Image (tube, coloured by chain):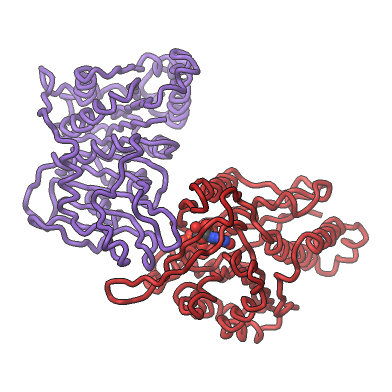
Amino acid sequence: MKSVYINTASVFSSDYKSYGFFKTGSSWDSCPLSLTQVLNKQNPNVPHFLGQLSNLGERKRICTLWISKSEQLNKFIVSCSLTGLESSKRADFSGRIIYDSINVTYSSRDEQDGSRESPDDVLAIAAKLAMSAVDFSWNLDDYADLKSFEADEFPFIDISSMYRGIAAANPMTEKYAFSKPQGLNPVHEIRSLAKSLGLRLIIAEELVDEKINKEASVSAESRASALPKNQNVIEEFVEDLEGRLESVVGERRFKEIRCLAPIRWLRNSALNVFPKDLPKPGEVQAKKSSAKNFESSLPNYVDLVYQSTTNVKAMASLITGIGKIVEAFDSVTILLSVGKNNRATEAAQKSHHNLPVPLIIISFE
Amino acid sequence: MPQSTTEFNVLMLGSRGAGKTTLLAVMWEQLGKAISAQKGYFKYAHEASMYFGHALGELRRMYDAPGINVSPGISGTNNPKNLSIDLHTANHALAHLRLNFWDYPGGLLSPEQATGPEAAVLQQQLANAHYFFVVVDAPALLEHDGMFHAIRNYPYPIQLFLHDRLRSSSHGARILFVVTKCEKYIREGRTSEICDAVKRGYDNLLSDIAGNPRSSADICLVQTLGTVVLDKLEIAETSNGDKFPRYYFKKVSQNAVHSPQNTSLPLKLMLDKAIHESIDRRRASYDGLNWLRDALGRDDELRDLLIHMRDLSNRASDQSLHLSLQAGQ
Ligand SMILES: Nc1nc2c(ncn2[C@@H]2O[C@H](COP(=O)(O)OP(=O)(O)OP(=O)(O)O)[C@@H](O)[C@H]2O)c(=O)[nH]1
Ligand SMILES: [Mg+2]
């Protein structure tokens, strides 16, 4: 299943609203469901932070990416939104600039349609959208038909070429190669991917350990019972980490680094509270004996720092690479959020203990 | 006696692009001048100052274009907003009054939005608002013999929205018609023409209001930009042949800057009712004990504030741009 949602307004009669399309065969048909409905249909168990993904009315430029592989649902899902795209050609009847937002969603399996499409183009689009979260010159004007717009119609008349156009803007030139020996765990893979892209990873497990040791007993049982306490520790830690980062690079530099992107990674842990209908943490742990690094109940953070705009390209490769990594594992969920002042970080932190799987957030500040 | 904060809800009704957000932003900027600092002050949450501050910034950006051209400024509102402002008096820690401004996007008033979660929000707001701004687009009312009044100002939908309220509510409804984009017409001395056009254009609503003696109706004319006038209102056409208006504005001079006119008037008309209502509600909740409130001078501060504000307002605003149609009991 592939879908495209666009939020826009017409010149006069239609105010901001979302228009949905899904791919059937080689054509794109309009979809009566809302984006929220589509996402819920794909995975009813998952996350509270989807609000940000489906909030296409947002005016700030924010890219949100949800990549999820569920063994249980036997599904691989990629969904990416970019909001706040300011048109430079379209203004409404009263002269106000039109803002567009876009979402693309892929699911490897859908009840109605037996065909299995490749996620590659969606990942390429996701990478392009993530890059465009910091490239304010990019918008959807290339795909808007101005004549239709002036005649008060929906201007994105050719979804198919728009879809191909955005995907082609960021072709996945290389196939992602797993590290050898392959597949220890997703973190390992993401780490080596980042390394191969020349991106600097700050691994912060030691810092978490240090914090949690101070706050709670080291024994696993007491950690499990100290969930809310640890929750605070995690949040404190994230703040703390930002402070440390600032002290490492200096306040001025810290502000100068336009593309500062910490990746926060929470390891699947016994601290997670599972929704009732999903397997208990213990069961998952038992099943995943191969995933050796998942045994620890400590959350694990990995922070990634970009220091120049050239690395925005590397980020695109990272995103397509992460897609491939997630697809190859059993159960992983990743949330990426790129943009200014976004609430995803906060929302994801609040809700991550309800996630049955790990979570990554990237945010640009 | 415990003091509580009176909630006063203000609903902005008007079509897409009528000027609701613009009006709110410039009124917000006027707050400091509405009362003198010794008498009271306004406090607002971060969200309200962000929203209004951002809108004001965008309005000023309209003047950046070269010559007498106007740049696109403010953007359309995409979902219903609630912005709160508290009114404090000097001697109370707790706010006397909380004004909740409901900025409801005009696009959501269209018939195709008649169902769904936003429609439910509108229903709620129509029932719970204490004050209504009906924002009227002047060019639609006057240009091309008012041919766009119906599709731009929604007089009939707005009448229907308020119908139940005016029929059944013992409190009635306090309605202020604020006519925006008046720069051109005020310069041409056409104020009474505007008032007549409002009376004609909303005659059904006005007769509903007349049927409820508790209700009030006022008209006021504002210039929320002050120095940007309508250049022309072009008749555009959709592919189906439906006509719609396209607005073209220009600055009055190359060096023009944002200078809103008469925007303190709607603010003061609304605040007057809000403070009045706050006193009434306080007294209503004390019932037989109001002699005690009077003896203790509990309401003096607010009464004093009301008199003070009316005085300031009478001096500051151009009364010829205000027409009271029905005072309301
Ligand atoms: N010249 C002039 N322009 C105005 C006035 N009021 C609003 N405008 C312009 O009209 C356009 C629409 O104003 P908004 O405040 O965005 O309208 P709105 O009612 O909030 O519209 P929605 O958010 O779509 O419901 C903006 O470009 C404003 O600058 C006015 O009094 N004078
Ligand atoms: Mg608005």
Residue A302 placement (x, y as % from top left): 32, 22
Q: Position of residue A137 (x, y in %)?
A: 33, 39
According to the rendering, which colour does chain B have?
red
Q: Residue at x 34, y 34 (%)?
A: A272
Q: Nearer the viewer, residue B40 or B199?
A: B199
| Rendered position, B59 above or below A174 | below
Q: Residue at x 66, y 61 (%)?
A: B8
Residue A58 visible in the current orientation = yes
Q: Please state if A9 lies on the left or on the right of A256 as rendered.
A: left
In the picture provided, is A220 more to the left or to the right than A3?
Answer: right
**Quadrant hosting residue B189:** bottom right
Residue drawn where x is 39% and y is 70% of the image: B115
Residue at figure coordinates x 11%, y 21% from the top left: A182
State the purple chain: A
Q: x, y percentage for residue B113? A: 39, 69
Q: Nearer the viewer, residue A345 or B75?
A: B75
